[in-house]
Image: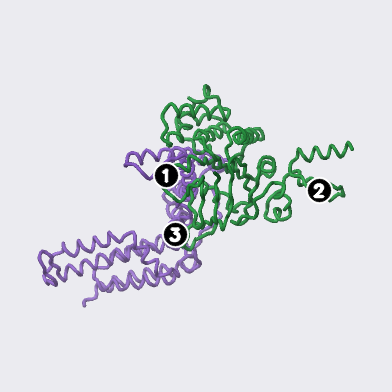
């Protein structure tokens, strides 16, 4: 049941997007979000849409991932579309039947907001699809490190994220094992009302917490015996370096941003 | 009535890209009061197989009958789980109650017994595993030592008075004394209560010593199920599977290499010892 759950949605690969520095990818994702938000006219969305297709192609991510990234959002997307469709006032009536009244303005507005959300979600998923969780935390740590001047614990935060990510599969396995052991003693997790079911989780949760604390203790001990003392002066196995690709990607995204600003000002 | 495994195959995550066949076409019977040893290299399917014996895993193909009860039938599962006690690796990690007695009572309670009966069974099981209830019943299971925790967890299974006891490496991580205690407890359950035992072990000496028959699993298939004598006669094949041989068998092989003629194969140290002493005296 819990076996073999891959973490996040990282797709291992060796495309030029995969090879980008994680810091570049995080920053460019911010630029991408800005791009999507500066679009004010529906047809200008053509530009970020092209950019999205280009990013998927460069990352060699199969098109099916475009849809699977939207899947968790499908109800929100539908809800947004419907709300905009009925709640926007307009002049040109397209359809009027009983209390349903759809105007051209409302339809355009609904498409506009839905498209914006689709582009946002699918675009940001490129980041998580092409960057492993470890690289992502490495990049975040580097980006946050200037904040250390104001005593922001950048390294500690990144280390905590790394450790948490590392232990998710381990704890899943552990849960599975404890659950089976209690089932072998006749525990029943499936029947009964809500209170009974919540109570039936105790024989799983108690051993799980005990073992999580034990693992945390052991890990702390192992880190200390290898002289871990926080981020100060620590060297890394993977040094992050900017390459030519990072510059190219930045130029492309900035060009799109400028392009949109120009198009928005062109009177049509 | 025995446990019969018929044409059992199991595939993890069938139908997906990650489908992984763990067991294929296993046929085997475990008799009443029999001690069956299960050996096999890591990943040979031992754990997968034993989890079928009480319906924790369902066969992808074939079936498993426990005293004639099919493990695929959801309604029979509770009954089957009280017939087949299952001790996982490191069972001490399943302890969760405030007191040892409450924890040991978890199984019997799930069987729907009345309080007096539960109390009696808990005390009986604790006595059996060598944790005198007067001293241990009211303690927190988390205050016990490692070996005591293991025995308390074992008592939690024994309190259900299972007809069969399945143990997955019950001695892992114990010192020699702890190992001997668990082994003799398991053996006495078999000889005194007639409990059928299925024990997965990496120690060839332990299975050679106690098992009536040994099942050898290799890459999800049943290579052989036979008496220890016949199983360890396949020394070469076992070594090729990455398995070990009992000390006595290795000694016989080493002595033969040095030109000593030994009439037959041995797999138990005590028997080999007697034979060598007789030979010395003759």
Same chain letter for marks 1 and 2? no
Chain B painted colour: green
Judging by colour alone, the chain drawn in purple in this rendered image is A
Residue occupying image coordinates x 25% and y 65%: A113
Query: In which chain is the residue bearing label 3?
Result: A
Helix, strand or loop under label 2: helix
Q: Which residue is drawn at 55% across and 40% down?
A: B164
What residue appears at the point 24 percent right and 60 percent down from the top-left corner? A79
For disc 1, the marked residue is A151
Q: How far apart are marks 1 and 2 (CA)?
A: 68 Å
**Relative to residue B249, is residue B159 drawn left or right?**
left
Residue in front for this viewpoint, A94 or B237: B237
Which label belongs to residue A23? 3
Instruction: Give coordinates of residue B5: x percent, y percent.
Output: 55, 51
Callout 1 secondary element:
loop
Residue B254, disc = 2
């Amino acid at each position: 049941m819990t076996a073999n759950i891959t973490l996040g949605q990282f797709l291992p690969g060796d495309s030029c997007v995969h090879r980008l520095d994680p810091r570049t990818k995080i920053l460019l994702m911010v630029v991408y979000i800005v791009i999507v938000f500066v679009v004010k006219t529906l047809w200008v969305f053509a530009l970020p849409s092209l950019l999205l297709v280009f990013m998927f192609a460069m990352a060699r991510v199969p098109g099916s991932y475009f849809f699977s990234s939207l899947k968790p959002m499908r109800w929100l997307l539908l809800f947004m579309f419907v709300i905009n469709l009925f709640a926007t006032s307009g002049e040109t009536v397209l359809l009027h039947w009983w209390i349903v009244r759809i105007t051209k303005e409302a339809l355009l507005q609904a498409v506009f907001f839905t498209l914006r959300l689709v582009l946002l979600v699918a675009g940001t998923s490129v980041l998580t699809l092409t960057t492993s969780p470890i690289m992502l935390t490495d990049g975040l740590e580097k980006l946050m490190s200037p904040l250390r001047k104001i005593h922001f614990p950048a390294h500690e935060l990144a280390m905590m994220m790394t450790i948490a990510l590392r232990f998710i599969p381990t704890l899943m396995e552990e849960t599975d094992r404890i659950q089976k052991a209690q089932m072998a003693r006749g525990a029943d997790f499936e029947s009964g009302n809500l209170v009974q079911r919540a109570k039936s989780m105790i024989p799983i949760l108690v051993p799980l917490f005990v073992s999580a604390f034990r693992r945390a203790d052991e890990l702390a001990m192992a880190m200390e015996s290898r002289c871990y003392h926080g981020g100060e002066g620590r060297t890394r196995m993977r040094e992050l370096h900017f390459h030519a690709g990072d510059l190219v990607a930045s130029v492309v995204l900035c060009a799109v941003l400028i392009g949109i600003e120009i198009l928005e000002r062109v009177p049509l | 009535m025995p446990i019969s495994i018929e044409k059992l195959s199991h595939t993890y995550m069938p139908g997906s890209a990650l489908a992984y066949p763990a067991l294929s076409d296993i046929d085997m019977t475990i008799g009443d009061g029999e001690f069956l040893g299960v050996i096999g290299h890591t990943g040979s399917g031992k754990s997968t197989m034993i989890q079928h014996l009480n319906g924790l895993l369902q066969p992808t193909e074939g079936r498993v009958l426990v005293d004639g009860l099919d493990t695929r039938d959801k309604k029979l599962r509770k009954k089957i789980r009280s017939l087949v006690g299952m001790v996982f690796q490191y069972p001490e990690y399943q302890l969760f109650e405030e007191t040892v007695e409450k924890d040991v009572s978890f199984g019997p309670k799930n069987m729907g017994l009345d309080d007096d009966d539960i109390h009696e069974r808990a005390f009986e099981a604790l006595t059996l595993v060598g944790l005198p209830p007067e001293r241990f019943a009211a303690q927190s299971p988390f205050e016990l030592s490692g070996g005591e925790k293991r025995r308390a967890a074992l008592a939690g299974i024994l309190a259900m008075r299972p007809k069969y006891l399945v143990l997955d490496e019950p001695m892992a991580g114990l010192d020699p004394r702890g190992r001997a205690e668990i082994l003799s407890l398991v053996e006495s359950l078999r000889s005194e209560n007639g409990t059928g035992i299925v024990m997965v072990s990496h120690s060839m000496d332990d299975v050679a010593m106690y098992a009536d028959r040994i099942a050898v699993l290799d890459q999800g298939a049943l290579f052989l199920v036979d008496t220890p004598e016949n199983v360890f006669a396949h020394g070469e094949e076992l070594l090729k599977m990455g398995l070990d041989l009992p000390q006595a068998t290795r000694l016989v092989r080493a002595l033969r290499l040095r030109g000593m003629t030994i009439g037959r194969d041995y797999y138990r140290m005590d028997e080999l010892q007697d034979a060598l002493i007789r030979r010395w005296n003759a």
